Image: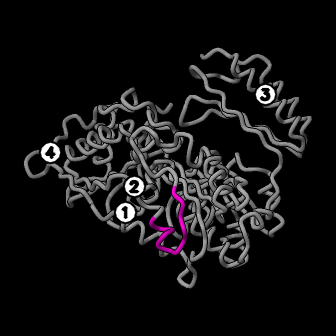
């Protein structure tokens, strides 16, 4: 059983276990212990999103790292993929992101990148937990000149902006394009508007005034309706919505219709297939992706592979078998030829380049895939629910799956980042799947925590 780490690092309500300064300091010490080599001076990058609690966790992590004789490079608010980029470009030994991604502002989290910009595998996260709870580091305390130092890297945003702009084709520009951009009052507020404006677009910015408490609040990738309404109001060509730490992208077309990660992946996969740059003609996604995406890939002459939920598992599958592109319905898109993790800004640039090249609006491009009716319910729980102990729950799922046949599926899973059980039902009839999802949701809501 994991004690601290979930599907995407450590996450919880800030200042309540496990997201306390005490744990953060110990995490910092453990990361430093793992990367440290007696023959060299080592450095770890720390970045964060715009949450108020980021200050205390940043200082605790930095103190823990320095106490083990490793130096800290502080980059301040920067998107998660930007921290992965800075970690590799500065040849640091690790990168740490302080963010709870799409969660509300009172939550916070810690995500860790290795020196190569990839998130740590489960085994290394288990090693960190062991170091923290076994007290193996207790006697290891460098002194005098061996104590680590911390310094700020003031040009980190500029470096990342240049990197992103270089992704966009040199022979193209965004001149004449009107973009509505929602930064969710998160880590992209000081990056994304500059990227698209400097490439020539007219940008109507939303969610660019963080106050430490408004991150993700009724805006961004989780609430694309704000972006969609602004697109219709202004007559913009497209809307781009990012989440709090900038690793997700959800868009809307010129008519204000929301386009999720599955459709964005279909558009980008089709482009890569035509260029013969989709390695092994394979798209890697998760069990949450719509069956329509699988059909679209088959129609293109490619195939789709599913992993468990979490962009880190998508990336692990890509690295293991030599694939180049993958992502999640929620908007994580990973272009492994360019970066090591999901990047909402990079994905947007790839999508805009396709629009420019094909001279087609988003509404036309999105027709490459037709979604099967799908419903997703999130049931918040007061504690851990053992679904195997819920009376008749598995039996009910079995009957529903038999009725859906090969034209539908049911997925029930616990979230790895919040106390929520997610119920997803897919099928040919919206009415049928709504009824099934409601029934399963009611059974979970009535169940007693173990």
Q: Earlier in the sequence, mark 1 or mark 2?
A: 2
* Tag shown at residue 78: 2
Where is residue 104 shown, x and y percent of the image?
A: 50, 36
For the residues labelled 1 and 2, the Cα–Cα distance comes to 7 Å
Q: Secondary structure at mark 1?
A: helix
Residue at the image point whose x is 71% and y is 77% from the top:
359
In the image, taking residue 256 as reference, residue 346 lies left or right, namely: left
Give how far across and how far down residue 394 sits, in percent. Answer: 78, 26
Give the SS element for disc 4. Answer: loop
Residue, disc 1: 157
Q: Which residue: 28% across, 48% down?
A: 32
N-term mark: 2 or 3: 2
Q: Marks 3 and 1, how far apart in space?
A: 45 Å
Of the pair 8 and 367, the residue shown nearer to us: 367
Q: Earlier in the sequence, mark 1 or mark 4?
A: 4
| Magenta-colored span | 194-205
Residue at the spot x=19%, y=43% of the render? Answer: 67
Element on which disc 3 rests:
helix
Q: How is the image coloured?
A: one colour
């Amino acid at each position: 059983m994991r004690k601290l780490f979930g599907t995407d690092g450590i996450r919880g309500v800030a200042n309540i276990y496990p997201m306390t300064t005490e744990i953060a300091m110990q995490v910092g010490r453990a990361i430093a212990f793992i990367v440290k080599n007696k023959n060299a001076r080592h450095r770890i990058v720390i970045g964060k999103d715009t949450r108020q609690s980021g200050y205390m966790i940043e200082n605790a992590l930095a103190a823990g790292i320095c106490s083990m004789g490793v130096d800290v490079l502080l980059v301040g608010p920067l998107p998660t993929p930007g921290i992965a980029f800075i970690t590799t470009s500065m040849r640091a030994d690790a990168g740490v992101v302080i963010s709870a991604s799409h969660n509300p502002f009172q939550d916070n989290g810690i995500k860790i990148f290795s020196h190569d910009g990839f998130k740590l595998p489960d085994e290394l996260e288990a090693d960190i937990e062991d170091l923290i709870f076994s007290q193996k580091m207790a006697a290891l305390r460098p002194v005098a000149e061996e104590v680590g130092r911390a310094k700020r890297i003031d040009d980190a945003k500029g470096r990342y902006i240049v990197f992103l702009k270089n992704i966009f084709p040199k022979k193209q520009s965004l001149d004449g394009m009107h973009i509505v951009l929602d930064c969710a009052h998160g880590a992209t507020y000081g990056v994304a508007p500059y990227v698209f404006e400097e490439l020539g677009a007219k940008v109507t910015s939303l969610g660019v005034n963080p106050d430490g408490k408004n991150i993700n609040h009724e805006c961004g990738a989780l609430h694309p309706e704000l972006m969609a309404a602004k697109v219709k109001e202004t007559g913009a060509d497209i809307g781009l919505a990012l989440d709090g730490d900038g690793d997700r992208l959800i868009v809307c077309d010129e008519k204000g219709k929301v386009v999720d990660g599955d459709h964005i992946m279909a558009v980008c996969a089709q482009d890569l297939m035509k260029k013969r740059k989709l390695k092994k003609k394979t798209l890697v996604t998760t069990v949450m992706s719509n069956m329509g995406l699988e059909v679209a890939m088959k129609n293109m002459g490619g195939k789709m592979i599913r992993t468990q939920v979490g962009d880190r598992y998508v990336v692990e599958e890509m690295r293991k078998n030599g694939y180049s592109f993958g992502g999640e319905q929620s908007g994580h898109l990973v272009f492994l030829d360019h970066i090591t993790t999901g990047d909402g800004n990079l994905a947007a640039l790839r999508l805009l380049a396709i629009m420019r090249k094909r001279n087609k609006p988003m509404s036309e491009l999105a027709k490459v895939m037709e979604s099967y009716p799908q419903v997703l319910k999130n049931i918040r729980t007061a504690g851990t629910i053992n679904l195997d102990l819920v009376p008749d729950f598995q039996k009910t799922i079995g009957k529903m799956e038999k009725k859906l046949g090969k034209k539908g599926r049911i997925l029930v899973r616990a979230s790895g980042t919040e106390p929520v059980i997610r119920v997803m039902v897919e099928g040919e009839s919206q009415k049928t799947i709504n009824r099934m999802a409601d029934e399963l949701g009611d059974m979970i809501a009535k169940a007693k925590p173990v």
